[in-house]
Image (cartoon, rainbow, N blue to C red):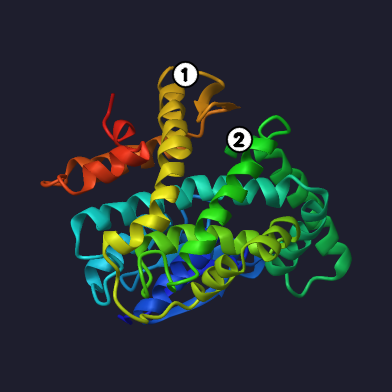
Amino acid sequence: MTNTYKIIGSEMSPYSVKVRSYFRYKNIPHVWQQRTLANQDEFQKYAKLPLVPLVVLPDDTAMQDSTPIIEKLEVEHPAPSIYPEDPALKFLCQLIEEYGDEWGNKLMFHHRWGYAADQAAVPVVLARTMNPDAPYQAVEEMANMIRERMVGRRYFVGSSDETAPLIEKYFARVLDILEPHLATRKYLFGNRPSFADFGLAMEIYEASIDPTAGGIIRARATNVLDWCFRMIDPKDEGPFEGWETLKEGLEPLLYDVGHFFLPWSVANAKALMDGQESFTVDLDGDSYAQQPQKYHAKSLSVIREKYAALADKSALDPILEKAGCLEWLTDR
C-alpha cells in the first residue's frame, strides 16, 4: 500500500485548493488531479456527493469535507502544528476557519455569480478545465449549462438582488480589517499558517481570480492579495504570536464573526428546525433574508461542541464576549 494520497479537485474550488494547500504545507505525499470528464468514473467510484475535493486515502477510502480532512491529517501529521499552543487562540483559529468556510464562501460566491462579467468568464474557465481537449463549441455549450445552473444556485448562499448591497458591504469590511493586520505578519496568527488561514484565505483567493472581486481586492487590499496567494504554498516562516500583539487586528474580525456570521448561523439553524422556507435575521441593524442552508446547521453544532469541550474558558470568554460571539456559542 502506497502512502501517497490523491486529491481530485478544481482550481476554481476554494475547498479543493484549501486541502491542497494543507498537503503542501505538511509535505504530505500526494497527487493533485484536476477533476475532468476523463476521470469521472474514478471520481464516482469514491464520491458520496458530487462535490470536490475528493481525497483518496492510502487505504483506498475517501473523504470529501475539507475541514474533517485537515483535522484527521493534523492528528497524523502534527508538526508543524496549525494551532497555537494557547487553547484560547486554538479555538479562535477554529472559529475563524468556520467563518471562512461558510461566511467567506457567501462573499465569494455572490461576486462570482452575481455580476455579468463573472457570469460570462467563470463558466468558460470551469468548462475548459472539465474538458481540456474539447473543441470550443463543446466548451461553450458546457459553459452555458454551468452558467444557468450556478446563477440559479445563488439563493443557496443567500445571494439576491435584495441582499447584494449587504454582502458587498461585508466583503469590503473584511478586506479593510485584514489589510492592516497583514501588513506586519505573513499569516493571521503570526508568521506561520494556522487553521484559520486555510479556511479564510482560500475563499478570498478564489474571489481574487474572478473579474469583479479580483478588481476590488487589487484596488483595495494588496496585503490581503499577497496573503491569499502566499497560502497557495504556505511556509513556516516564524512563530505564532500571542493575543496581546494579535488583538488589534483580530478583534475587528471577531466582531464580524459575532455580529454577522454567528447570528446568521443561529437563525439559519432555527429556520431549518422550524421547517421555514426562508428566514430574516437582524445583522448589526440590517435586515438580511434568505432560504436556510442545510449543511451549515451541522457545522454550527460542531463549533459549539468544540467550545463546550474546552475545560478552561477563562482566557477565551472575555475575548468572545467583547466581540459579541459568546452568546451564540451555546445551544439556546
Whole-number angstrom distance, CA of label 1 to CA of label 2? 17 Å
Q: Residue at x 51, y 74 (%)?
A: 232
Judge whether 151 appears above or below 184 on screen.
above
If you read the primary sequence from the N terminus, does the residue marked by circle 1 or circle 2 appear first?
2
Image check: 204 left or right of 267?
Answer: right
**Quadrant of the frame with the C terminus:** top left
Q: Position of residue 104 (x, y in %)?
A: 53, 50
**Please, what is the three-letter code of the amino acid marked with disc 2?**
Gly
The residue indicated by pointer 2 is 158
- Residue nearest the viewer, comparing 97 with 92: 92
SS class of the residue under badge 1? Answer: loop
Q: Residue at x 41, y 64 (%)?
A: 188
Res 24 → quadrant: bottom left
Judge whether 289 appears above or below 301 on screen.
above
**Please, what is the three-letter code of the amino acid marked with disc 1?**
Gly
For the question of whether residue 323 can be seen, the reply is yes
Judge whether 197 appears above or below 263 on screen.
below
Q: Residue at x 36, y 36 (%)?
A: 324
Q: Position of residue 301 (x, y in %)?
A: 31, 37
Q: Residues within 10 Å of mark 2 (few under 14, many from 20)?
A: many
